[in-house]
Amino acid sequence: MMRAELRLLEREAVAGDVADLETAECECFADPWPGRFFWAEMNAPARFCRIVVDPAGRLAGYLFCAWHYLDLHVLKIATLPAFRRQGLARRLMALAEEHVRECCGETVTLEVRQSNAGAKSLYSSLGYQEKGLRRKYYADGEDAVVMTKVPQGRDMIGVDHETVG
Ligand SMILES: CC(C)(COP(=O)(O)OP(=O)(O)OC[C@H]1O[C@@H](n2cnc3c(N)ncnc32)[C@H](O)[C@@H]1OP(=O)(O)O)[C@@H](O)C(=O)NCCC(=O)NCCS
């Protein structure tokens, strides 16, 4: 079955989005970030903070990343429930990878809850590889799986990545 194409607009996240992000967090995560975390990320150096809105201006998804040397680290990615399974998270991850290529970075890395099968399936389908575990990474004690990818079009020569665990 063909899916109707989502008419969505992507743009940089700004201070005026914080209230919507805070509400969205409660719909998307059991351990939501408070709004001030988003505000701090938007105002920190070496960040890549994007939101996606529908034609009515409603928040559909968001992506917050931070550069760690040549690695773009995904701190947050979420699609609001009404917009799921329509390729939006895939599109957000493509933005992150495009940003890495534009900035001559090397990798995209993220942590995902071991129990988050949907997100792990998303990242695997995009070519992310499991690199190890961060034990008790989340406040409730759950481990995080670390996943990473060298975006296509990047040649990585002589870079030895830290093994985590
Ligand atoms: C995980 C999440 C970001 C996926 O967003 P999405 O926009 O629905 O994802 P997409 O539509 O781009 O999915 C792309 C592919 O990922 C996989 N996928 C996504 N969600 C999935 C799910 N719930 N179960 C199984 N596979 C899933 C599928 O392979 C999917 O392709 P398909 O729809 O053609 O089968 C979204 O469910 C979400 O925001 N969850 C809560 C927050 C969260 O867990 N964030 C990730 C933290 S690491």
Image (cartoon, grey):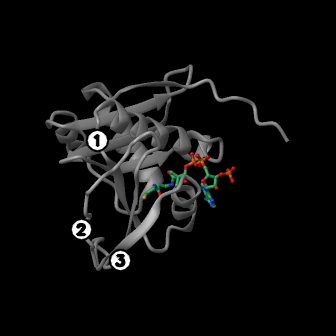
The kind of secondary structure element at disc 2 is loop
Which of the marked residues, 3 or 2, is nearer the chain's N terminus? 3
Task: Give the side of residue 162 with respect to residue 78, left or right.
Answer: left
Out of 44 and 132, give the one closest to the viewer: 132
Which of the marked residues, 2 or 1, is nearer the chain's N terminus? 1
Task: Give the side of residue 117 with respect to residue 10, left or right.
Answer: right
What residue is rendered at 55% in x and 68% in y?
117
Out of 79 and 135, give the one closest to the viewer: 135
Q: Which mark is residue 162?
A: 2
What residue is rendered at 44% in x and 35% in y?
95
Q: Can you give x and y, in whole percent of width and height, for residue 160 in the image?
A: 25, 63
Q: Quadrant of residue 137?
A: bottom left
Q: Is residue 75 visible?
A: no
Q: Residues within 10 Å of mark 3 (few under 14, many from 20)?
A: some
- Nearest to the eye among marks 3 and 1: give it: 1
Q: Is residue 153 visible?
A: yes
Q: Residues within 10 Å of mark 1 (few under 14, many from 20)?
A: many
